[in-house]
Amino acid sequence: MPSPPTPGPLMIIGGAEDKLRKRAILKDFVAASGGADARIVVIPTASSLGPEINEVYEALFTKLGAAEVRTARPETREDAHDPDLVQALEDATGINMTGGNQLKLSGAICGTPFGDAIVDAHERGAVVAGTSAGASIQSSHMVAFGAGGATPKQRMTQVAAGLGLVTSTVIDQHFDQRNRYGRLLMIVSQSPQLLGIGVDEDTAAVIEEVDGHEVLRVTGRGSVTIFDPDRMVTNAHEARQSAPLLASGVVLHVLPAGSAYDMTTRTLVPPTHTVDESEAAEIAEAGRDLRRMARDIAAGDVSPTNLRRRMTRHRKRLSVSPTPPATDGDK
């Protein structure tokens, strides 16, 4: 009996991803979706923009090398029962949900055949990405709306159901830029079984299954903030109206690009240290030079003056070593 397919990666983007310069996050999405074989479906339901939002993403993903880009835009729950829209997702290798109003998005697709088709696509291996509203809806519990601020206060936000692609979590976006620490802390104070994930702009939390564990890796310019409230102490059950909440014992993780976090064990994945190739080559050359000088001194055939001159030439050679030519991504 064949083993079940591995679920595809989830790309949870905090909003305002770079669309004009290096477009690193969008490039990663196209590559993970199959590159030149990618069949991408854009879902702009959350957006208040018209056909222009479709054109922007279709042009972007086509320019980045995707084989096929199409749009599926259910605006109502009735639309989300349309067999043609559901069928548009059946052979997708990548699905991208745009930003906008996450309550509009969840209200239109959660619990419908269209929403179920997104979950099915993820489970068969397709990449599911979403920015801003499209990020929040991927969690089991979704921030519907609410005020910003650093202090958690009773009733400062409300929660709705998401697609549940990431279970037992609540995801917020534009996190640092819009100071959403307080509202995410409020949610985990009221529901300490949830892991709180806040994603900065132009940043992605990429979640993949690795050896049976859900592992979150961070890419982009900002950070991903995680609140683990498993052992927290809170007064959320008795705080009144908009009173500040007690939130003590929350484990905080702030993860910049290159960091990884095991969501199954709720622990940081130890960082791996990489060696810069040019730096390693420079150190090796310096070591060879020092060994050569040591041999010369031992042989007694080199004067201190010549040694100083050799060292000066060596330092100049290192300081003017040519830099590699810029690639397209560096321009």
Image (cartoon, rainbow, N blue to C red):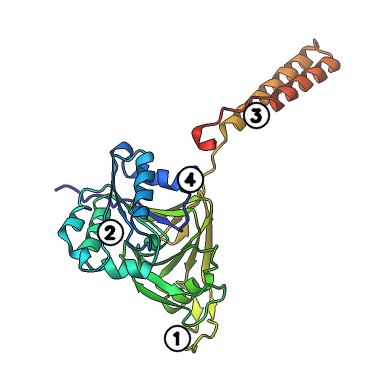
- Residue holding disc 2: 73
Looking at marks 2 and 3 on the same chain, the residue that comes earlier in the sequence is marked by 2
Task: Name the amino acid, label 2.
Answer: Arg
Crowd band around label 4 with a 10 angstrom C-alpha radius: few (<14), some (14–19), many (20+): few
Q: Where is residue 224 in the image (x, y as percent from the top left)?
A: 50, 58
Residue at 50% of width from left, 48% of height from top?
A: 258
Camera-near label (3 vs 4) is: 4
How many residues crowd mark 3 within 10 Å: few (<14), some (14–19), many (20+)? few
Residue placed under numbered mark 3 in the picture: 283
* Amino acid type assigned to the residue bearing label 4 in the image: Leu
**Kind of element beneath mark 4:** loop
State which tag comes first along the sequence, 2 or 1.
Answer: 2
Q: Residue at x 38, y 69 (%)?
A: 142
Q: Is residue 295 at least partly visible in the picture?
A: yes
- In this rendering, the answer to whether 35 lies above or below 149 is above
State the separation of the CA atoms marked 1 and 3: 60 Å
Query: In the rendered view of the protein, which quadrant contains the C terminus?
Result: top right
Residue occupied by mark 4: 20
On screen, residue 77 versus residue 233, left or right, reads left
Upstream in sequence: badge 1 or badge 3: 1
Circle 3: residue type: Ile
